[in-house]
Amino acid sequence: MFFDRVFITHLCHLPDVFYCLGSSRIWNETWLSGFFYKPCNYELFVKQSLNMEMAIVMARDGGMDWIIHLDTDELLYPGGAAEYSVRRLLAEVPRDVDMVIFPNYESSVEHDNIKDPFSEVSMFKRNYDHLPKDTYFGMYKEATRGNPNYFLTYGNGKSAARIQDHLRPNGAHRWHNYAKSPNEIKLEEAAVLHYTYTKFSDLTSRRDRCGCKPTKEDVKRCFMLDFDRAAFIIASTASEEEMLRWYNERVVWTDKQLNLKLLRKGVLTRIYTPMTIVQSLRESGVFTSAITAGQPAVNAKLSPKETNAQSQNVTAPGNMTRVVRSTDSKASGRKILQAVDLAFSDTNVTAVPPLSPPSLDEHRHHSE
């Protein structure tokens, strides 16, 4: 979990979101357009993609070799790497590989009063890609525990891309290249640890960020995954006591015998190293020092003066893809992102959304 440098992009939020659109190439393309002008998770997905587009420019300007998009509820677990180092892990990737896929593991909380997931959660459900298929499908029902899918949320991992010409995001989970079809590999031990719904308050916080109606039909236009839809309906219609009961039944792993069985089968696994590292960093004050040291730079980049200037340089929302003037740095960014005449066409490549892992029904269908 050690990086040379970490860039945290938090760029495309109102009022400067119109500037982001004005300087964005992907806003004018069709591969992401199916997610435009939709609420909740779809809106977040677009913002993530816009941030990834700008982060490519920042990473290139900073002399970075690789780029990866992680959410605030995720950690990168470099299993199998020497010195537990992401840098060492990526340094061993063959030069002809453009993209490295980290399958995700999903947190499996054991009580309903988690306060600090990164330093309290040690049990995770392993990804389909890291399990024998007979084990995955053989234990599917017990591992799913009545939920819509094997994982509560997504199961298609995250990817790191080598910084190179014509790189672009392909949704929050993958990268693509305007000039070629990227050569990708999937890691056999390393993973992204996804701490999803680890706190009971996650139910209400997600509800409070979305204004959709709590009906089976309306949640489909707001959330991409089945569990998110069900959680939103419960959080919007049930009492706190009913929510807590639902949370314990669906999210919390209280059956110790089942846990032990799935641990022995390899479906569940214990990972303690991230917990130990995070606890040590908190106790040593490294997190506080890093935030304090980085805040002036963040403030400088996102100062009200700059934000106001940016918002004044764009047209009205109805035609928000033109910028009236630009600085040298903005022109540099667009030069990297601008369209080029290429023989390779990626017009049929659409954004990769969060996807559920393979289901038992799909397995049966393919087996027939």
Image (cartoon, rainbow, N blue to C red):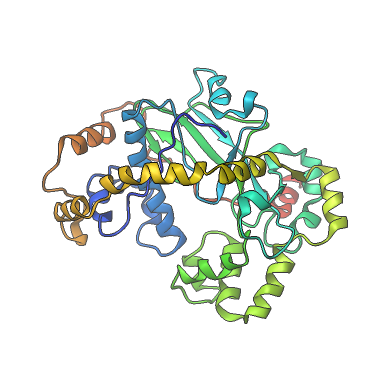
- Foreground pick, 15 / 23: 15
Where residue 15 appears, as percent x and y from the top left, is 25, 59
Q: Is residue 158 visible?
A: yes
- Most extreme residue toward the front is 284
Query: Residue 135 falls in which quadrant of the image?
Result: top right
Work out whether 25 lies above or below 143: above
Where residue 290 appears, as percent x and y from the top left, is 44, 41
Q: Which residue is painted at 50% across and 34% down in the image?
A: 160
The answer to whether 236 appears left or right of 358 in the picture is left
- Foreground pick, 109 / 320: 109
Query: Residue 36 falls in which quadrant of the image?
Result: bottom left
The answer to whether 336 appears left or right of 314 in the picture is right
- Foreground pick, 262 / 322: 262
Where residue 70 appears, as percent x and y from the top left, is 50, 44
Count of number-bearing discs: 0
Query: Residue 14 falls in which quadrant of the image?
Result: bottom left
The answer to whether 343 appears left or right of 334 in the picture is right
- Quadrant location of the N terminus in the rendered image: top right
Q: Is residue 178 visible?
A: no
The answer to whether 231 appears left or right of 366 in the picture is left
Work out whether 119 lies above or below 178: below
Where residue 213 appears, as percent x and y from the top left, is 48, 77
Q: Which residue is painted at 35% across and 41% down in the image?
A: 53
